[in-house]
Amino acid sequence: MTGPPPNDAEKPSMEAALHEAGFPVDLLTEEQRQVLSELTPQELTLLLDVKSRLDAVGPEVQAHGEIAGGALF
């Protein structure tokens, strides 16, 4: 026997995964957190991939956002 299956307490929460990836989850509203908590694993993977690509070009994207007054993750 290999042991009991892992329970939910052993899995990182969606909020923890997003926080670890650099999302400012502590600044989000409860409604926004609720939306994020309902993401499927595939949606989370996609969101984290997009975030990592944006981070890779950070200064360029941030400069454009400041000029345009836009807000990006």
Image (spheres, helix red, strand yellow):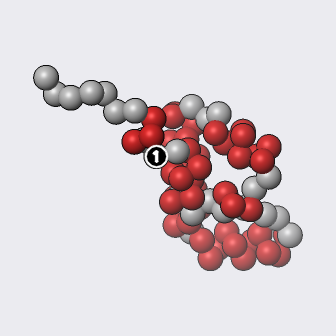
Q: Nearer the viewer, residue 33 or 46?
A: 33
Residue placed farthest to the left in the image?
1
The relative height of residue 69 versus residue 13 in the rendered view (above or below) is below
Residue 35 picture quarter: top right
Q: Nearer the viewer, residue 31 or 49?
A: 31
How many marks overall? 1
Q: Is residue 42 visible?
A: yes
Give the residue drawn at x 57%, y 63%. Answer: 22
Q: Is residue 73 visible?
A: no
The relative height of residue 41 versus residue 27 in the rendered view (above or below) is above
Residue placed farthest to the right in the image?
69
Question: Left of 31 or right of it: where is 53?
Answer: left
Q: Please, what secondary structure does the residue beneath circle 1 have?
A: loop
The relative height of residue 52 versus residue 42 in the rendered view (above or below) is below
Which image quarter holds the C terminus? bottom right
Give the residue drawn at x 72%, y 40%. Answer: 34
Residue 64, x across and y down, in percent = 75, 71
Give the residue drawn at x 55%, y 44%. Answer: 14
Which residue is tagged 1?
Answer: 12
Question: Left of 71 or right of it: where is 61?
Answer: left
Residue 71 picture quarter: bottom right
Give the residue drawn at x 52%, y 45%. Answer: 13
Which image quarter holds the N terminus? top left
- Tell me the amino acid under the disc marked 1: Pro
Residue placed farthest to the top in the image?
1
Residue 23, x across and y down, in percent = 62, 59
Residue 19, x across and y down, in percent = 57, 58
Residue 42, x across and y down, in percent = 52, 33
